Image: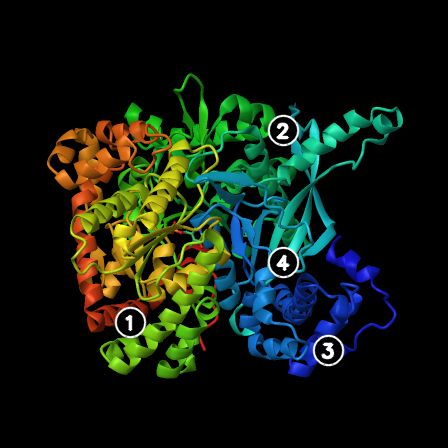
Amino acid sequence: MTTEQRDAAGPGTALPEDHLRSGSSVDDLRGAVLAKLAYAVGKTQPDASQRDWFLATALAVRDRIVQGWQNSYRATNAGGTKRVYYMSLEFLIGRLMFDALTNLGLTDAMREALSGLGVDLDTLREVEPDAALGNGGLGRLAACFMESMATLAVPAYGYGIRYENGLFRQVVKDGWQQEYPENWLSFGNPWEFARPEIAYDIGFGGHVETLPTEAGPPRYEWFPSETVEAVAYDTPVVGWRGQHVNTLRLWSARAGDPLRLDAFNQGDHVGAMADRVRAEAISKVLYPSDATPAGQELRLRQEYFFAAASLQDLVRRHLKKYPTLHNLPDKAAIQLNDTHPAIAVVELMRILVDLQTMPWAEAWEITQATFGYTNHTLLPEALETWPVPLMERLLPRHMQIIYLVNALHLDKLRAAGQSDVEVLRSVSIIAEGWGQQRVKMGTLAFIGSHRINGVSALHTDLMRQTVFRDLNALYPDRINNKTNGITFRRWLIEANPALTAILVDVLGPAVLDDPSRLEGLAAHAGDPALQARIRAAKRDNKLALGRIIAARTGVQVDPDALFDIQIKRIHEYKRQHLNLLETVALYNAIRAEPWRDWAPRVKIFAGKAAASYHTAKLIIKLANDVARTINDDPTVRGRLKVVFLPNYNVSLAERIIPAADLSEQISTAGMEASGTGNMKLALNGALTIGTLDGANVEIKERVGDDNIFIFGLTAEQVAERHRTGLSARDTIAASPRLAEVLEAVSSGVFSPDDTGRYKDFVQALSDNDHFLVTADFDAYYAAQRQVDALWRDEAAWWRCSIMNTARVGWFSSDRTIGEYARDIWNVPVAAAE
Ligand SMILES: *Cc1c(COP(=O)(O)O)cnc(C)c1O
């Protein structure tokens, strides 16, 4: 049932008083929640479940967003202000209730209002489904950006897909990952507004007709063979202090003709339903792939579906106000979050040339001036390409346009004197090879955009040197860097109220509006009283996490042990296995010298593996095998515990991060584009142990070399190893500690039930250690012992922790969005208060 239907289903006579819709006193809020419980949820107090109370509360909060939403919309429209359209196949938004309450400043009042009804706000918080419309960092970035754009009053729409099933729910059974569907919408979604009147036809397949014109080139018209309807669902996104509200517009697929009645009436019920199922499959599931392309036709259908719907939507909005699309770049900036929406470049050309009969050259100028493209990965296996025959069959007119864009692009280069076949091949949108032609979506996005950005300084440099080297030489002004950021509202104020209270106390409430004020903390980093407060807050957070760990895994952890945290997607380049091998080495060392004063540690892992990524799933099994063996070994006596927390998502991250002492950011240098988990953890006072990769480099520059543990090969050294060969035999032979660990894992010490389980896995590390786990092992082990040493010096440790919080204000996504606004979108941002 949609919210509208639920509203309509209420008795409908005694509509609540107006003040109940907008008032913010405790009494107003309590009255509003009770009105929602009665009229929208249809329950009375005695029968209300926690979920009923959550819905009533969320709907009452939502009412308080709507006025600001309409004001923001009207102001943007009246002023003719330029809008930003952020197109992303993923929005990893998580729960929304505390975002809304925090930004409206209503958290305390609502807590009190509910407590008067015998309801606990923090219990309701856990009832809200976690909206996981994304895989990891890329999708979470889109969500942080939406919040920051609202905060900075940048008029913006986020465009994406309303997947019925978000990222799978991870269950760990006997140590193995199992995937279960995550039907987050099954009990309704109180934050969204269905907009059945905002629906567009999206075509697929069919053929193209050439229509001669009186003068000039012929016109082309696409006649699709299949039509799917895209229906809008809007979620308001409220910014800090509730000043500005933007829209996240997600598209749901619906069969054009709900049921083909002719077929249905002729008795072909199954046939009629089949078309419908095929159409609606587009918004059924998020592809659970991370850093690998999902080479499925349905995925390409998803990409075109949401790109085309979003373009129709923004073009309609533009043409309602202006007579032509000539001024589109003055009124709209479209940002492509990775290449997934890159087909939008071609769709805009089709709209301009075929539908608006604009000359090609002019259309191309408008297109380039409107689009910006963010690159998120350099891993060759993750660069998206589509087979030409598939593109031709699904989007025949678009394929024609791509060929022409490419031919004109290459002509221009040849005319400018470029004759090197290798260069021309590398900058062509069409790749030969693999036995078939393919469309390189990254090249298409690059050529169709006026700005292309990387997501950390190192990643942007590597973009210039590797994937886009030749394109960068041709268009040297286009690539620029926009180091990622995170929203401090969610990752500090909401996730860590205890630390937030201390910061406000020490630095004043203005720190909540201006994260650069965190710097003021540095002057007090050595203050024993402040250290004691920070430490006590962390201990409470660790106790709370300990309760979650006990409830979900049965493992008891000591809040006074060092909490060593690696939480992120499971991937070989992120090297959870490096951490596990070090864990085994530490285990061996503790057993060998049990009398020594070992610093107690809890190693906490969480993360999902792509369902088809066998090695990543084996790494999860290894984490669980190592955990069981170590946690059951009486010799270790609690000095080392290992935990794998299942079903990592935004909500779990919000509980783990405030409890972290050490942040593991140990990817193979050159492979993590930026990382944002690293920023969340440093902000919450965790010290980083990491490689010089992604934004770790910039975190190090800001917190200072003394407040971070850096180890391992540099990106340059990694590239050199990849050139000269990756056999790890000599490395292993030179490190008795590593050899012993590998031997233990390989021979089945951690898998007595199946002693061969890790044989091939260890063998592969010795033969072809692409991710350089063995090469970095000794340096990592040594860095971990430095961590132990610092942990024993309490004053020094907490000084470092405070310095981390003090010096990472720059990683606020408000700063990142300010840079996009200035350098890419050319839109103003609201000044900080
Ligand atoms: C921040 C975040 C990520 C990204 O983490 P990295 O360590 O940067 O890979 C992934 N998933 C969730 C749920 C997050 O909150």
Kind of element beneath mark 2:
strand
Residue on which disc 1 sits = 802
Q: Is disc 4 surrounded by few (<14), some (14 to 19) or many (20+) residues within 10 Å? A: many
User: Of tags 3 and 4, which is closer to the observer?
Assistant: 3
- Amino acid marked by disc 4: Thr
Kind of element beneath mark 3:
helix
User: Of tags 4 and 2, which is closer to the observer?
Assistant: 4
- Amino acid marked by disc 2: Tyr
The front one of 178 and 228 is 178
From the viewer's perspective, tell me whether residue 555 is left or right of residue 708. Answer: right
* Residue 298 x/y as whole percent: 58, 32
Indicate which disc residue 378 carries: none
Displayed quadrant of residue 744: top left
- Whether the residues at callouts 3 and 1 have beta carbons within 8 Å, the answer is no
Residue on which disc 3 sits = 31
- Quarter holding the C terminus? bottom left
* Mark 3 or mark 4, earlier in chain: 3
- Whether the residues at callouts 3 and 2 have beta carbons within 8 Å, the answer is no
The front one of 616 and 402 is 616
- Whether the residues at callouts 1 and 2 have beta carbons within 8 Å, the answer is no
Q: Is mark 3 within 8 Å of ligand 1?
A: no
Question: Does any portion of residue 574 appear in the rendered image?
Answer: no
CA gap between label 1 and label 4 equals 37 Å
Residue on which disc 4 sits = 235
* Mark 1 or mark 2, earlier in chain: 2
- Amino acid marked by disc 1: Ile
CA gap between label 3 and label 4 equals 24 Å
* Mark 1 or mark 4, earlier in chain: 4
The front one of 797 and 382 is 797
Residue on which disc 2 sits = 220
User: Of tags 1 and 4, which is closer to the observer?
Assistant: 1
